[in-house]
Image (cartoon, rainbow, N blue to C red):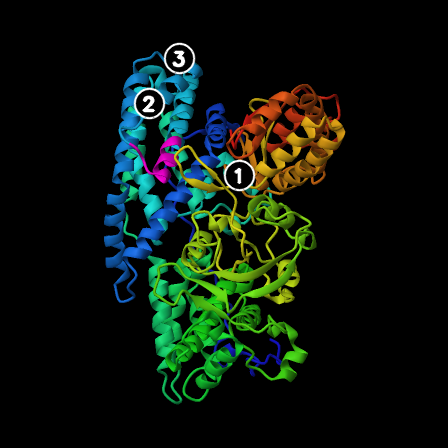
């Protein structure tokens, strides 16, 4: 322990409690789910059944980014309804949750009915066809022909369109399995599979509702772990290599699709109708399991702690109140289950934190803290700042400090949690960091001179305030006041990156129409996520911020890294650097993650009108990489934003040198490929029999460290050569695509039979690979390019 720590003046908290026992782990593993055995052993060596490989391959093929976006939209829509209809803080979370579920069930009932009707109709029509002779083109024609009975609202229409793609994939795979004699479809046809898949729609939308209102089933576990438990060969393979921590894996919304995909796959690969019925029964039964509402419970517990701290009497000990609050934090954290299983750690932490906050609460200390918060800029948020507001703000700052400390400790490695001395040191450091983030300057200037890390902002006046003031079900923090930038020149911030990996300079041009050489006035708004916060929650609730309060406003939020905070606000301490191992999802947020929004007076996000008549924000340039090993090909989906697409079209019309055009594309491709191979969220898809869906970065780690670099160089070479040849021959086709009224242009680049790909496939199965055997430089593979108006994923 650091005996110079300004917040604690003792060598050991536990010594004073009379115990220095080493804390033993108290966690237990999740129960495994029964599954049809697809794993066999022969003479002591693991042999993977080809059916198991085909099952995993299909799960990777099945994942659809468009379906994820449709689910995000439904979650956001449900959350908005929940907040509007149930804003009162006095309601019991359990009662409110049940009422909210009933209301949202009614809201989504038309979508459920239309979706089930489609599955039923297509099951009847496709069920009449012989799966051994049915072609993919016939399937696509039949599915595309189906139309809903009435007009759907835009969010429902997007979901319905994604479901049609799912039916196509399921039917096509069922035909393929039937021809191989693997699936029950060989005997019964496609009808029973689609009919039983219909029963999974309601549980799917139930999960959407649960996510929107913060309802958490107690059995919830990452889909990667669930799949590994069911397929032992995957579990053994992942355990042989260092994998990405589960806490930084897929988001909760993405897991909705993974869970649904796995349920459908189980129906497809079942050998009997009994197995199919069991799968459907399990999906329906899971919806009846008792659940909790951890976000609502945390909100209520936080409010109770704030009120209890405000009403403390002279000399009263806050420990009982902190002991009640700390356990309420853990269920709301994705990583909280690790700490919740260590009761002794939780009890220690509650007592430890109660002691640390004593100098900020109670009649003796609270008024000084309240005044410090007012002086730091409480009124900059246009709050009334009455004495009651100031008192509540002070208690809220203390509660936020406790909450963030627990979050930090929950993320500590096991060896820290299980060792008392390490735990004490880690907890104190976590408290100091949390205090620096949530409390105004409360220590002496001499202390800050010696420990500058204890103050996030040294020159900028402000304080983090919990928002919004009115009771909502989704909370976030906002930095008081806005930070002016009198002359914003995009080139000055070219080094900053958005969630898509694009330079901020390009994002401002593509989303707001600000030329790179233009100078404008701007204001910076800073935000921080709390447990359960979605970026769309911030956009929806910031009603007075021009451009942010819109349907696609969350796309205008950017990561507030230390570099961004330094360039935009002159305060690097306000930034939170992103874990390079974490595949960031721009639609979700982890507690403590920070964002910034640039408000540019007179500028609003550029939009495009969709066929439904809805105005949608234009997309940023982006690249998606698919390593498809069963097809022995690499596909790259390069979407060029409207501005980038027109930029290239102009050069082609002017008959500019093709090398100049490909050089501009090279910068975009290089950036996109690097992000994809680093595991950026949604940018890499690996279709492979031994790759866990959604864990592309973990699969790449099985390869020698130089292999991704070699692959990157070969991809750059193959793609640019292909683009140079194709654009030269198909100039008119590209110009025509750019003239279309849809948003941007997508180039689908397919590299067929790439050299070294078979060796990579074996290496991902755990078989050794040397650079000498890779042979990726042996020849130039064929490159095919499709030019498609608008945005497409697959």
Note whether residue 647 is visible.
yes
Q: Position of residue 783 (x, y in %)?
A: 66, 22
Q: Is residue 756 left or right of residue 405?
A: right
Q: Is residue 698 left or right of residue 387?
A: right
Residue found at x 35% / y 59%: 473
Magenta region, residue range:
151-161
Q: Position of residue 202 (x, y in %)?
A: 29, 38
Are discs 1 and 3 less than 8 Å apart at CB?
A: no
On screen, residue 288 above or below 788: below
Quadrant of image for the N terminus: bottom right
Q: CA distance from mark 2 to mark 1?
A: 44 Å
Q: Nearer the viewer, residue 85 or 239?
A: 85
Label tally: 3
Q: Is residue 399 inside the magenta stretch?
A: no
Q: Nearer the viewer, mark 1 or mark 3?
A: 3
**For residue 236, which numbered disc appears in the image?**
1
Q: Nearer the viewer, residue 346 or 483?
A: 483
Residue found at x 58% / y 29%: 738
Q: Which residue is mark 2?
A: 146
Is tag 3's residue or tag 2's residue first in the polypeptide sequence? 3
The part of the image, by quadrant, that contains residue 630 is top right
Q: Which residue is mark 3?
A: 134
The part of the image, by quadrant, that contains residue 472 is bottom left
Q: Nearer the viewer, residue 409 or 148?
A: 148
The part of the image, by quadrant, that contains residue 93 is bottom left
């Amino acid at each position: 322990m650091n005996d110079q720590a300004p917040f604690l003046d003792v060598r050991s908290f536990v010594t004073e409690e009379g115990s220095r026992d080493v804390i033993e782990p108290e966690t237990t593993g999740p129960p495994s789910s029964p599954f049809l055995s697809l794993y066999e052993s022969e003479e002591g060596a693991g042999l993977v059944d080809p059916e198991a490989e085909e099952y995993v391959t299909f799960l990777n093929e099945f994942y659809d980014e468009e379906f994820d976006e449709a689910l995000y939209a439904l979650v956001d829509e449900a959350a908005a309804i929940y907040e509007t209809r149930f804003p009162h803080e006095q309601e019991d979370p359990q009662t409110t949750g049940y009422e909210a579920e009933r209301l949202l069930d009614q809201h989504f009932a038309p979508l459920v009915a239309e979706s089930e009707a489609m599955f039923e109709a297509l099951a009847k029509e496709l069920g009449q066809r012989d799966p051994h002779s049915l072609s993919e083109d016939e399937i696509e024609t039949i599915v595309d022909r189906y139309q809903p009975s009435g007009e759907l609202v835009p969010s429902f229409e997007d979901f319905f369109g994604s479901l049609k793609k799912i039916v196509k994939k399921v039917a096509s795979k069922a035909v393929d399995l039937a021809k191989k004699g693997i699936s029950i479809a060989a005997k019964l046809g496609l009808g029973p599979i689609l009919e039983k898949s219909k029963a999974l729609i309601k549980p799917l939308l139930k999960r959407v509702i649960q996510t929107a209102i913060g309802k958490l089933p107690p059995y919830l576990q990452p889909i990667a772990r669930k799949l590994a438990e069911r397929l032992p060969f995957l579990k053994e393979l992942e355990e042989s290599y260092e994998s990405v921590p589960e806490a930084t894996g897929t988001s909760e919304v993405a897991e909705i699709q993974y869970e649904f995909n796995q349920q459908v796959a189980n129906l497809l690969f079942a050998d009997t109708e009994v197995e199919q019925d069991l799968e459907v029964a399990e999906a329906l039964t899971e919806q009846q399991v008792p659940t909790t509402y951890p976000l609502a419970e945390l909100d209520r517990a936080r409010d109770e702690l704030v009120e209890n701290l405000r009403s403390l009497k002279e000399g009263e000990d806050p420990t009982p109140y902190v002991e009640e609050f700390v356990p309420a934090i853990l269920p709301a954290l994705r990583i909280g289950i690790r700490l919740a299983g260590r009761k002794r750690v939780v009890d220690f932490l509650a007592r430890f934190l109660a002691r640390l906050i004593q100098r900020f609460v109670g009649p003796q200390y609270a008024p000084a803290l309240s005044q410090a918060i007012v002086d730091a800029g409480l009124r900059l948020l246009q709050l009334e700042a009455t004495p009651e507001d100031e008192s509540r703000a002070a208690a809220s700052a203390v509660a936020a400090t406790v909450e963030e400390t627990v979050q930090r400790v929950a993320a500590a490695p096991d060896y820290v949690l299980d060792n008392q001395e390490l735990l004490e040191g880690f907890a104190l450091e976590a408290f100091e960091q949390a205090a620096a983030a949530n409390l105004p300057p409360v220590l002496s200037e001499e202390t800050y001179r010696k420990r500058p890390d204890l103050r996030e902002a040294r020159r900028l006046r402000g304080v983090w305030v919990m928002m919004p003031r009115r009771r909502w079900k989704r909370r976030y923090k906002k930095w008081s006041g806005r930070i002016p930038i009198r002359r914003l020149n995009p080139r000055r911030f070219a080094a900053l990156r958005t969630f898509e990996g694009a330079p901020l300079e390009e994002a401002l041009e593509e989303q707001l129409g600000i030329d790179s050489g233009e100078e404008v006035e701007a204001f910076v708004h800073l935000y921080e996520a709390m447990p359960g916060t979605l970026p769309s929650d911030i956009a929806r609730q910031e009603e007075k911020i021009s451009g942010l309060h819109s349907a696609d406003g969350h796309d205008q939020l950017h990561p507030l890294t230390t570099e961004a905070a330094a360039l935009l606000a002159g305060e690097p301490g306000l930034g939170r650097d992103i874990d390079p191992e974490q595949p960031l999802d721009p639609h979700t947020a982890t507690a403590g993650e920070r964002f910034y929004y640039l408000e540019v007076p007179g500028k609003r996000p550029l939009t495009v009108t969709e066929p439904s008549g809805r105005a949608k924000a234009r997309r940023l340039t982006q690249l998606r990489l698919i390593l498809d090993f069963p097809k022995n090909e690499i596909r790259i989906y390069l979407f060029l934003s409207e501005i980038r697409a027109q930029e290239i079209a102009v050069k082609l019309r002017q008959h500019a040198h093709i090398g100049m055009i490909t050089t501009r594309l090279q910068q975009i491709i290089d950036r996109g490929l690097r992000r994809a191979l680093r595991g950026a969220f949604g940018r890499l898809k690996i279709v492979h029999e031994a790759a866990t869906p959604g864990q592309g970065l973990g699969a790449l780690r099985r390869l020698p460290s130089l292999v991704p670099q070699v692959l990157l160089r070969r991809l750059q070479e193959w793609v640019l050569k292909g683009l140079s040849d194709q654009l030269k021959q198909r100039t008119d086709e590209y110009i025509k695509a750019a003239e279309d009224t849809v948003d941007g242009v997508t180039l689908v680049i397919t590299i067929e039979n790439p050299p070294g790909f078979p060796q990579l496939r074996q290496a991902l199965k755990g078989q050794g690979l040397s650079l000498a055997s890779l042979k990726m430089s042996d020849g130039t593979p064929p490159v095919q390019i499709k030019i498609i108006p608008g945005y497409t994923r697959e």
